[in-house]
Amino acid sequence: MNKKLFFILAITLLNSCHKGEDINPTFYECNFNFADSSYANPNNNKYRSLINDMTSSGVVGVTMSVYHPQTGIWIGASGKADLYNDIDMKSCNISRVGSTVKMFTATTILKLAEEGKLSLDDKISSYLQGDVIDKIENANKATIRQLLQHSSGIYNYIQNLKFQTASLNDFIREWKPEDLLKYAYNQKSYFQPGEDVRYSNTGYIMLGMLIEKIEGKPFYKVFEDKIFSPLGLTMTKFAAEDHIPSGTVRGYIDMYSNLQVVESTYFSGWDYYTADGGLISNPYDMNVFFRALMSGQIINSNSLAEMLTWKNEKYPDPDFFPISYGLGIFKIQTEKGIAFMHSGDAVGYYANMLYFPSDSTTIVYAVNSNYGKIDQFVSTKVAIEKIISEIK
Amino acid sequence: MKILLIILTFITPTVVFGQGKAIPINVSIFNESSAIPFTRFVTTPIHPGLQLGTEFNYKVKEHSRLFQTANISYFFHNYLAQGIGLNTELGYEYRLKFGLAFEGLLGLGYMHTFATTKEFIFTNGLYEKKADRGNARLYPSFSIDIGYYLKKSETNSPKIFLRYQSWAEYPYSPDFIPVMTHINLHVGTKFCINTKAK
């Protein structure tokens, strides 16, 4: 009887692995209107060496764009877009870029303020009602500005252990905003609004709801109208419209910190529909967006000044740069000077965009792998300093 | 192959121990879940599991007993991991006259988990498809259950039970999530084989 049981268990173990998905290489083709002169860029070898170094360390694939006023824009890629089908990463490939969307959310809110449709110092409760206001501590007092600046003190639903285990329990669940907000219901706020700053995804879900309330359509449609289309960001999409649009590279996670990765492309359902994540883009489009924003092409100089009004955190993370919080944007002091930035994680993906106001150098990179040892090469302070020092 | 040897080593003493008298066998199917213990009861989606075990008594009184279990279990968590575990528990049971019984069990075990999706291993600067060697874990557990003895006057009566098992997986994801908590909701039965020593 025992032998039979062991035989059944052994067969079960051998046969219960998801084999992998056969994907035609044409899925990853991406041609966009851009006269690519990256090979002629005087820094081409230096930049290419940097991204090759990342993939030879254990990052599955990376795409990067670098803009410098003297040399223009460079784009490049290294590693794999798809390990199972052995597809190389291309510089135009798109991936999930997580919380970098918060800069798009903030920009849209500032545009709405310019249009006279809201005031940054209005309370969010002037626009939203019901459980979102009644059950989330501080929501009845916080202003739109405080939500944008992470100074509302509102509890971050992602920190709720019940949410973390629930998302691990059902990796491919598609969470709706109201499902996520429930994990912030009746949770103690971090501080009184305005007292300090602390990152809160909850606030950005509420800001997405605010955009929808004012414009009467999904917030990502407003992104398209006010940002994507005017700037010609043809490779930028929102996951709610198409979870895994053609060209999306596979995501991978180093769950056990041993550079043994598994695919996680379908695991990011918790930010498909919310304004705190869910953006899909590539470093070229994100570079265009960041420079356009900083040069006043999207919002006017007054709005930009509001966005770049900083509030310092009282208790900086000792393992990261001390961060000053603007409206949907951060300021850090690097070895090469002040940088404005926003990064973003999704399950299996990480992206980071940096802008140096001293000379407009703009660096954006996106990788299709994270967690474990891989984070040491892409998202830690040491990794970001290394990337900056190689480029600037 | 190594795993099979470990399993055989673990099970053999329990079979020998029971020769010539009633050997209690516990069989249960369960739903595994990543969850904070005692915050959820039934969870979806179902992650099926099977547990097979035996037990022996340390001390038996009219209504209660102190006992030790030895179990082998397997669960399949779609998209995350499948695990095969070996554990032992110290248990206390209180049995009422009409057959209802309550148990509390404190356990410790070893688990080997395998990815349920294709794993790629970084070797010599490249990711390659290689056989998954799996990951070793410790898993302490605490369970409570309610059961019912079908033949209430017999010591070795068959029993059916519902067990709520909370357990922790360590290490889980080093540098990211050091410990993960789980719950297993078991529905099972206990019966005896070789009843000469009734």
Image (spheres, helix red, strand yellow):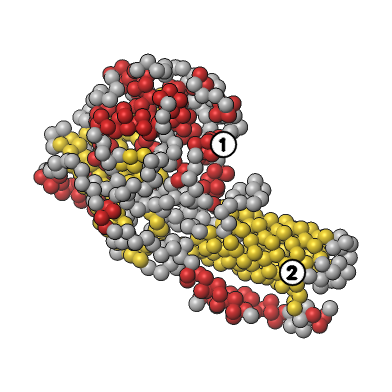
Question: In this orientation, which residue lies closer to the viewer: B184 or B109?
Answer: B184
Residue A290 position, x and y percent, is 27, 32
| Image position of A351 (left or right of A130) | left
Tell me the amino acid under the disc marked 1. Answer: Lys
Host chain of mark 1: A
Q: Is residue B83 left or right of residue B163?
A: left
| Chain letter of disc 2 in the image | B
Residue at horizontal 72 percent and vertical 59 percent from the top: B162
- Classify mark 1: residues with Cα within 10 Å, few (<14), some (14-19) or many (20+): some
A298 lies left or right of A139: left
- Count of numbered marks: 2
Residue bearing mark 1? A182
| Labelled pair 2, 1 in contact (Cβ < 8 Å) | no
Q: Position of residue A322 (x, y in %)?
A: 39, 33
Numbered mark located on residue B190 in the image: 2
Q: Quadrant of residue A101?
A: top left
User: What amino acid type should be assigned to the residue bearing mark 2?
Assistant: Lys
Seen at 41% across and 32% down, the residue is A218
